[in-house]
Amino acid sequence: MRLFTPALALIALLALAGCSGAEPAGVASTRDPTTPSPGAAVPPSPTPTAAPTASPTPRPTPSASPIPIYHPAPYKVAIEAGHGGPYWWGSAGRDAGGNQLIEKDLALDVALRLEALLREAGYETLLVRDGDHTLTYFDASDYRGSLVAETQARVDLANGARADIIVSIHFNGSSDASLRGTETYYNPDRPFGLESYNLAYFVQRELIAVLSDLGHDVNDRGVRNDAEVGGDPENAHSFLLGTNGGFRPLQMPGVISEALFLSNADDAARAAAEGTRQRLAEAYRAAIDAYFAWLPSQGVLVPTPTPKPLDCCGFSFW
């Protein structure tokens, strides 16, 4: 995902109509891919006969009924590895050895590690994508239309599986190589705003703790409103977390996490290390644990049975 300042959001959103083969800036979890350096591998040019990059996994039918958020364990976690397929790279950068790093690949790597950790801990899981593919045909000549359709398919998948939360895993990017750090986005204006905020808080807290423990020079960019990354020009919020015209929204709390900037040399070097990605997965798992430990305090999961009358001295108090 490419970082993008609020001051530029309106300009970029107005420019969306003119985008064709390039991914538009300002759409959460669908940012424009960083242009690879000369000599680097580039995505193939689209052709009318390009094969769809659809997942072979059957997708549940979207649920029209509300998903109950407050209930006892087990909980189901939807893990969304950002981007995927030949035309939807996300951000890119290089490690210390000059090897190219692609957001879609690193996000999937962390997602697979997280899924294994959660299953080991007793959670039910949903991997929105489990390989380098999209769920829908991604037409690079209609980038914006494709990314909206693909995001809708991912939202429908999470809703159909009746997940309790969704965690969208990304790595950031910017044309300003000095930008670095960690940030987590949520939508305060939809149902589950409080729950999404707390999930974002725990994710941000655990990521910062892990990166600090690894000796990284962390830059805590905080929990942020997803309106900063944009969506439909008529609705500032992202497609993934927002409620945009003609778009079926998520029915559970969710966050978009940006662990590190691939466009920053220091952050990219850290993200390139397999050990770092394992620790990031552990941080997401710890944050999810913390969220579900916090959740019962906000609602009644199981009604407390009425106590029986106390007996004393041959008569009842009631």
Image (tube, grey):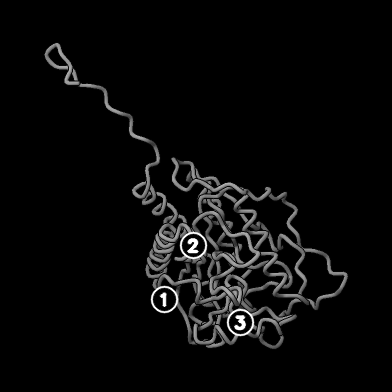
The Cα–Cα distance between marks 2 and 1, rounded to whole angstroms, is: 23 Å
Q: Which residue is mark 3?
A: 13
User: Which x, y percent locates residue 45?
Assistant: 80, 78
- How many residues crowd mark 1 within 10 Å: few (<14), some (14–19), many (20+)? some
Q: Vertical placement of 33 versus 156: above or below?
A: below
Q: Secondary structure at mark 2?
A: loop
Residue at the farthest top position: 314
* Callout 2 crowding tier (Cα within 10 Å): few <14, some 14–19, many ≥20: some
Provide the residue designation for mark 2: 190
Q: Earlier in the sequence, mark 3 or mark 1?
A: 3
Q: Residue at x 74, y 70 (%)?
A: 86
Q: Is residue 77 visible?
A: yes
Which of the two marks, 2 or 1, is nearer to us in this view? 2
Name the N-terminal-most of marks 2 and 1: 2
269 up-or-down from 248: above or below: below
Q: Quadrant of the N terminus?
A: bottom right
- Whether the residues at callouts 2 and 1 have beta carbons within 8 Å, the answer is no
Q: Nearer the viewer, mark 3 or mark 1?
A: 3
x and y percent of residue 139 in the render? 77, 71
| Tag shown at residue 90 | none
Disc 1, SS: strand
Q: Residues at badges 3 and 1 in contact (C-beta under 8 Å)? A: no
Q: Amino acid at mark 1?
A: Arg
Residue 207 placed where, x, y %?
Answer: 43, 66
The tag earlier along the polypeptide, 2 or 3, is 3
Q: Name the amino acid type tagged 2.
A: Arg
Residue found at x 62% / y 67%: 245
Tag 1 residue: 221
Report the label total.
Answer: 3
Q: Secondary structure at mark 3?
A: helix
Q: Nearer the viewer, residue 17 or 153?
A: 17
